[in-house]
Image: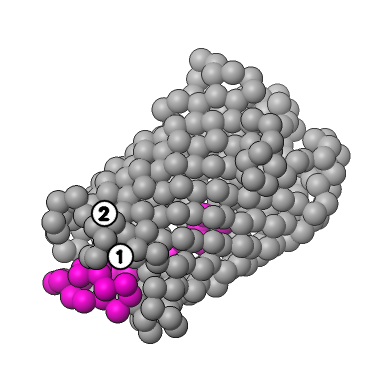
Amino acid sequence: MFRSFVVASAALISVSAFAADLGVKKPAPAPVVSAACKETKALPADAFGFATGSDVADLGAWGAGIDNTYSAGFRGGRGYGYSSTFQVSGSFIPCVEFGPYLFVSGGAYKPYNGVNASGNVVGGGVEFKYKLLGRATNGIGLTFDVSPNFGGYSGRNYFNGSSSAFGNSFRLLADAELIKGKLYGAVNLELFQSAFANNNGPILGAQPNTSQFNVRAALSYAATDALFIGAEASYQVQRTGMWANGNFRAAAAYVGPTFLWAVNDKWTVNGTWAYQVAGTDKSGPGRKLGTTILPLNMARLKLGYSF
């Protein structure tokens, strides 16, 4: 059951890579021509919860954000994961967004009647977005996103005392305007990768490189010019191997609400909560939700600022 603590690898690397997306575009009060890919109206990239819209920063525009994620609820014991990321992002070239970031993430797991194991990673990375298609001219927005990161790991009762850590993500971000000016939809295809240089732990032994493939779909409704509300569903599969090409570890489906509030023309707040509605791992579905790998609950709260 100590293998349940692989929540650490998800929290330490995959979550940090995911949290790199800090799109801080604010909703435009009226239709304007965007400098990036000729959009007729800006749509916040983070209006969809954990899913991400296709918009990138306008040429010469910059923003910053603090993104916090949290996960809890694992089969066979008590566990949690967290990640906090600070990112500055902007655009030097039309349709391209560049965003360096720093992060701290961690996790812990204690089997029932077992020994607690914990660990954390501190590191940084850089996110690159390239917008392939714009909604205004093609009816659908499409963006490619890659986000490599590196860090240093330290922990107790898991890997040996310290290790270097690597994470990366490849994401394809699509969105469309379903009802003019009111309802938007997004679909994301995501591959997260995680690896440790020194992973020969005293209890678990060698931990294989892992990867996680997610499919997300979300709707977001513009209740006002400043408030988006919506819902998201996702299906997530984790396997060994850096390219989801190894052994099956766990799979789960999630649903949950989302919101984004533009406090003013500079500040935005957005958040989401995802609840596992189905899940399985090597031990089987079981009577309870939550797996030894993927959590029962995931939440996100982000504060963004546009320069």
Is residue 40 magenta-colored? yes
Q: Residue furthest front?
A: 138
- Per the image, label 2 sits on a secondary structure element best described as strand
For label 2, the residue is 176
Q: Amino acid at mark 1?
A: Gly
Residue 17's label in the rendered image is: none
**151 to 99, vertically: above or below:** above
Q: Examine the residues drawn in magenta and state their main secondary structure.
A: loop
Disc 2 packing (10 Å; few <14; some 14–19; many ≥20): many
Between 170 and 24, the one lying in front of the other is 170
Callout 1 touching callout 2 (CB < 8 Å): no
Q: Amino acid at mark 2?
A: Ala
Which residue lies at the image location 49% right of the left edge and 74% below the top edge?
Answer: 98
Disc 1 packing (10 Å; few <14; some 14–19; many ≥20): many
Q: Which residues are magenta?
A: 16-44
Which residue lies at the image location 32% right of the left edge and 45% below the top edge?
Answer: 218
Horizontal placement of 30 versus 105: left or right? Answer: left
Which residue lies at the image location 71% right of the left edge and 26% below the top edge?
Answer: 1
